[in-house]
Image (spheres, rainbow, N blue to C red):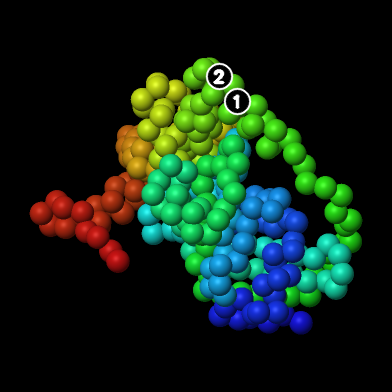
Amino acid sequence: MGAFYETIPQSLIQWIIEQKLFWVGTAPLSSAGHVNLSPKGGQYFGVIDERTFWYMDLTGSGNETISHLLEPNNGRITVLFNAFEGPPKIVRLWGNGRVLENGTEAFSTFVDLHKVQTIPGTRTIIVVDIHQVGSSCGFSVPFYEFKEFRPTLNDFFERKDRKFREGKTEESMDRYWALKNAYSMDGLPGMPRGLAAGKREKVTPLKKMVGPLAPTRYRDGQGFGTSQVLVMLLASFLLGAILMSYAPLLLPDGSSELLESVVGKTRSNDGSALVHG
């Protein structure tokens, strides 16, 4: 049966640490934005105490989580674990996420304090300040047997780091972050180091969405940008003007007089339009 807690129960902490895979869910504040769900594998995470979870964020082609957590007044994050072996179990951690970017004092302090072994490609530490924990049955989650961690990502960035150290400046992590981690798919700013490197080294960020619905910038509110609202207002005004101009030609005999009568009743004696609420 499902249960909720204000903190991580002691009975769940060791179980969390033993997991090989978890998911991270975030979203922008805009209802026009895209919800993101990222799988995280490996042994790069931990539980500091009953209210604090962390994981080492490795570099990838996307950076939705970072952008969402850095968005002003956002920071919402959900971390999900589920059992693939043994008794069924699902555990969710709800909280606010903090981004400790590689190269900052906050990152170095955390790494030193908690003895985190960083690897090439480490871009941030994500710290989750938990305000709610939930567990549920997981009865429908299938069994899977763990084989081994996939080394592809680590190998890729080890080679990239080696090339950079050999003098190939185009292989720098800053240039990679500028290309792929400077903005989210919705146009939210991403890694500060990526943004700074893009300006410094004139790297054009990768376009992440295609097709007519791909945003050209971040859209807040209910999904309509200011320019879109202005276009709709202008189109409505022009349509109204056209209808009023051609109505006498399009309406049957007598209808134009009726239209003028209706319009006239919406005018005050001094000629200004009345507003009916």
Residue 23 sits above or below residue 242 on the image: below
- Residue at 74% x, 61% y: name it: 19
- Dot 1: element: helix
Give the x, y percent position of residue 126.
52, 54
Give the x, y percent position of residue 90.
74, 69
Q: Which amino acid does label 1 sit on?
A: Arg
Q: Which of 141 and 257 is in front in this view?
A: 141
- Residue at 70% x, 33% y: name it: 155
User: In the image, 203: left or right of 65?
Assistant: left
Give the x, y percent position of residue 220.
41, 49
The answer to whether any part of residue 197 appears in the image is: yes
The quarter in which the N terminus is drawn is bottom right
Marks 1 and 2 in Cβ contact (< 8 Å): yes
The answer to whether any part of residue 35 appears in the image is: no
- Residue at 86% x, 65% y: name it: 85
- Residue at 64% x, 31% y: name it: 158
Is disc 2 surrounded by few (<14), some (14 to 19) or many (20+) residues within 10 Å? Answer: few
Residue at numbered disc 1: 162
The quarter in which the C terminus is drawn is bottom left
Residue 45, image quadrant: bottom right
Q: What residue type is labelled 2?
A: Glu
